[in-house]
Amino acid sequence: MNDIDAWVWWLVGAAALGIPLVVTAMPEFGMLAVGAVAAAVGAALGLDVVVQVLTFLVVSVALIAVVRPIAARHGRQRPQLATGIDALRGKQAVVLERVDGSGGRIKLAGEVWSARSLDTGRAYEVGQEVDVVEIEGATAIVI
């Protein structure tokens, strides 16, 4: 295998590692592919086969050790923009029908919702502003 063949084989290996990256969506294959591209560059520069393999290993392991934990941390973060019922928690609403522990109606985000008081002994009268603390099904729990 001469120098030209070596860099071509490294690029073929990088492309081969790109296929499972696309199919499985496992970023580790992409990091290995980048290591193969780095080894291909080394082969194109005329480096020895041992140095090419070491380049592949060092670049691949470094990417997996550095990038993978960062990606995992970002994957566990909650989205910054609350949507759906998560966006309604903490909002203020206006009581349309008396709200107590057994039920009532509020106007929340421009819509009429059924509601009940978090504290079953507390009641809110028509026109009072309340805060939504939770959504259970189609009922807002308010204080």
Image (spheres, rainbow, N blue to C red):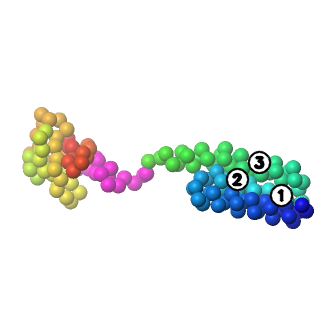
Sequence-first tag of 3 and 2: 2
Quadrant where the image shows the N terminus: bottom right
Residue 113, horizontal then vertical, whole percent: 18, 53
Residues drawn in magenta: 79-92
Residue 143, horizontal then vertical, whole percent: 20, 41
Q: Which residue is mark 2?
A: 32
* Amino acid type shown at disc 2: Leu
Residue at horizontal 49 percent and vertical 45 percent from the top? 76
Magenta span has 91?
yes
Q: Is residue 44 left or right of residue 133?
A: right
Sequence-first tag of 2 and 1: 2
Q: Are the two marked residues, 3 and 1, in contact with CB atoms closer than 8 angstroms? A: no
Residue at horizontal 83 percent and vertical 53 percent from the top? 52
Q: Main secondary structure of the magenta part?
A: loop
Q: Which residue is mark 1?
A: 42
* Amino acid type shown at disc 1: Gly
Residue at horizontal 82 percent and vertical 50 percent from the top? 53
Residue at horizontal 70 percent and vertical 60 percent from the top? 16
